[in-house]
Amino acid sequence: MTAYAGEGGRQSRTTGPPALLVLEDGRVFRGHAYGAEGETFGEAVFATGMTGYQETLTDPSYHRQVVIQTAPHIGNTGVNDDDPESRRIWVAGYVVRDPARVPSSWRSRGSLADALAADGVVGIAGVDTRALTRHLRERGAMRVGISSVEGDPRALLARVLGAPTMKGAALVDEVTTPEPYVVPAQGGKRFTVAAVDLGIKAMTPHRMAERGIEVHVLPSTSTLDDVLAVEPDGVFMSNGPGDPEPLEHAVGVLRGVLAAGRPFFGICLGNQVFGRALGFGTYKLPFGHRGINQPVQDRTTGKVEVTAHNHGFAVDAPADRPTETAYGTATVSHVCLNDRVVEGLELRDGKDALTAFSVQYHPEAAAGPHDAAYLFDRFTDLMATRGSTR
């Protein structure tokens, strides 16, 4: 992502030329350009976080999505060089109601509007985001176009209807690292992990490194031989964008990992790939879970966590009974308390010992909440336990 020069308190331009937002069902919203001027298309989704917008924008899971912020005031802390989760802003477009005129934070290195413009992200401000969010909650996520160069809603709608849908979209190869790299362990090295990058956030290997894990981040195209060549104590699959159904390569690699008996931990898209590797289906949610205030219950402890989410697909697994798979007994370990969506899976062997697990949400969430940080400890405990029995 672009480095931001200038004074943190410098006032930036927050009003641009008139802009138009058109949903694929024909609903029209008008505002003014925010960020880059031009035209963009993607899937309209809403995020409920009141903070952490820089982490949201740089999360590769948002590739090809137009993010609507439900919090009315965005940009008040500007942007800095420390919080990006990847090398660039990934959202296809950005929708806010009331952008900050002056960023105010000792960490700020520039304004959000300037950062969006620098990365070519077309946005719109002055929109009634409450009405837009209610519309998506009632009708479901859908394609959308934003334009500050087209004034005719009908013409923009025709281009929206020609844009690709998220269903069936295989996008991980567009966001993954082009080359392997290593994040060294902090302090003494305890374990080595092969992390398959499906759209990984920078905070994820950092959380592992804090626990003495040397993380080898590998491209999404890596083979099973590439993964095992690291001689890992455990294998990780990250979050990422798009539909899990077409990701046959990642599913095949994971099945090889499970057959080899290596401990596994997956997050978000990694959870969906894990589900498909175990033989479960996946499906598209009406409008998904996005934000930092989603209640999830860990069914193994009964504890309720407030968690960070970004997913539009979910695993179709029975929550009321275990399922026998080719690799052991699978159970649903976590559920969302808002809608009972599967939020985690566990796999146990014939001795009822944990061998692999995953969650649908983000325990690494830099902006918080941090209720689920214990899952990284669970992964280190799993590697310690399985390593002692190999």
Image (cartoon, rainbow, N blue to C red):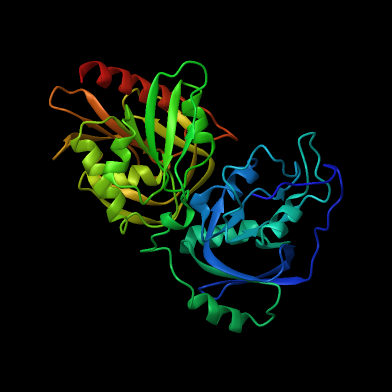
Tell me the residue at 27%/42% (across/down). 225
Give coordinates of residue 273: x percent, y percent. 31, 47
Give coordinates of residue 248: x percent, y percent. 27, 55
Q: Is residue 282 left or right of residue 77?
A: left
Q: Is residue 230 above or below residue 113?
A: above
Quadrant of the image occupied by residue 379: top left
Q: Quadrant of the C terminus?
A: top left
Q: Is residue 179 left or right of residue 331?
A: right
Tell me how many marks there are: 0
Q: Is residue 351 above or below residue 362?
A: above
Give coordinates of residue 56: x percent, y percent. 58, 46
Nearer to the camera, 152 or 88:
88
Tell me the residue at 53%/28% (across/down). 370
Quadrant of the image occupied by residue 233: top left
Q: Work out whether residue 144 can be spotted.
A: yes
Tell me the residue at 67%/37% (across/down). 82
Give coordinates of residue 366: x percent, y percent. 57, 34
Q: Work out whether residue 321 can be spotted.
A: no
